[in-house]
Image (tube, grey):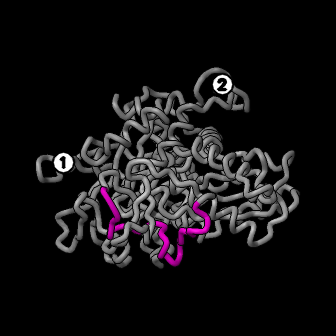
Amino acid sequence: MLKRQFFILLFSWIGLFGTAQQKTLPIGVFDSGTGGLTVLEAILNLDAFNNETGAPGADGKPDFTGEYFQYLADQANMPYGNYAGEKKTKLLQEHVIKNMDFLLQSKYEIAKGNQMMPARKQGVKMLVLACNTATAFALNEVKEHVAQSGYTTPTIGVINAGVKAALEFQVDHPGTIGIFATAGTVASNGYPRTILEMAKTKGLPQPIVVSQGGHGLADAIDRDYSFFDDQAKGYRKEYRGPSVFNASWRIDTALMLQYNFNKNANKLLCEFDDKGNCLDIQLNDPENYVRYHLVSLLEKMKAEQVATPMNTLILGCTHYPFMRDTIRNVLKELYNFKQGDHYRYRSVLAPQVELIDPAVETAKEAYVALRALQLQNESAKQKNLFFITVPNASLNEVKLQSDGWFTYEYKYGRKEGEGKKYVNFVPFDDQNISSATYQRLKVALPLTYSEIFK
């Protein structure tokens, strides 16, 4: 009996020691690209709780003051939103699991000339999936994998957080809820399903929900060559975004006034015939992707005769908050768009639309979980680390574009379950992150930007 009690006490002590050690670890934040940095910015800025008691209410002190972070952008395998359309959701889940393993484990690589050399880091104590598509398709798989791997690491996703914020607004402002997300997230039906389930749980009326897959927008924001090339001089054969002849994402030439595309510089590309007529149109700027998709959403609502105007729009991709001002301005422009004496979109669009960024609610959820599990860091804060995936060029089969990233065909043509090392995990640098992206981060996410360059 005494021997049994001794072992119970011993294992309890080991458990407490493990928790004490776990507290000092960083928090892992993951996205398919740099868009998830909007979630990290929200975490760094969050002051929604009393740090002494944990009760809701700002106390003038950032809630994650004692914490430090590891951020991972799976840039080599993005955009995640296209995997569903290519019928490769199993491959997507495989990528996400590999990324979680990287954050949980202690190894990574640094470039030394043309070689990748091993290096070490800490594992993380919490996983924040700051990617809507990864949350929609792989959150349950990640939780199961973490548990089967012997970790007790809590995992937070972004979809529940965004839905909660939207429904809170709807209590006093009922209207149609719009979902603006990647095509993959929309295909998963994750947001509408969660909205209806949460509304039922809260005893709220079932809201009307409409969705628009923002094909190419996140890709253009992250400067994916298949969707955006700021050096383009004319029509591009590599382009995969909306166009006049794209059956799935068709630019309707009858709606050119509504789109009101920005034609400056090379932001809109045309294929001309020998008489100078524009035969086909390609988008070559994030603003024009926003214009195309918002018009497409409102036209769909009109065709479906949605009776209640949209007054809430969930930005269901972490990249989209970078375009918040553009989205807001285009919505106002469309509300005031007039054909003769008729306002075309006022039957489906409210004069003011609440833009829901799930980032802040995700940050709150992470803080509550951290306190509930008693994982707050009480030791010295360490340096934040920022990692990105790059193609493993040593893999013989690999196919790369002229910009050094995977070709579209290779990226989505791979098979799941092959166990190949497609990517290397390396720190952010000036080669794998463009100067234009850094400039965008400096303006939009100043706290995160300063942490990257500490």
Residue stretch in magenta = 233-256
Question: In the picture, which quadrant includes the C terminus?
Answer: top left
Tell me the quarter of the picture where residue 323 sits.
top right
Report which residue position mark 2 lands on: 52
- Extreme residue in the front direction: 275
Q: Amino acid at mark 1?
A: Ala
Predominant SS of the magenta segment: loop
Comparing 416 with 106, the one in front is 416
The secondary structure type at the circle numbered 2 is loop
- Extreme residue in the left direction: 113
The percent position of residue 407, horizontal first and vertical second, equals 30, 68
The percent position of residue 288, horizontal first and vertical second, equals 51, 54
Q: Amino acid at mark 2?
A: Glu
Nearer the N terminus, badge 2 or badge 1? 2
The numbered dot on residue 19 is none
Report which residue position mark 1 lands on: 111
The secondary structure type at the circle numbered 1 is strand
State how far apart marks 2 and 1 are (Cα).
43 Å
Residue drawn at x 69%, y 46% is 332
Tell me: 292 left or right of 301: left
Residue drawn at x 17%, y 64% is 394
Comparing 227 with 164, the one in front is 227
Residue drawn at x 43%, y 57% is 268
Residue drawn at x 62%, y 41% is 360
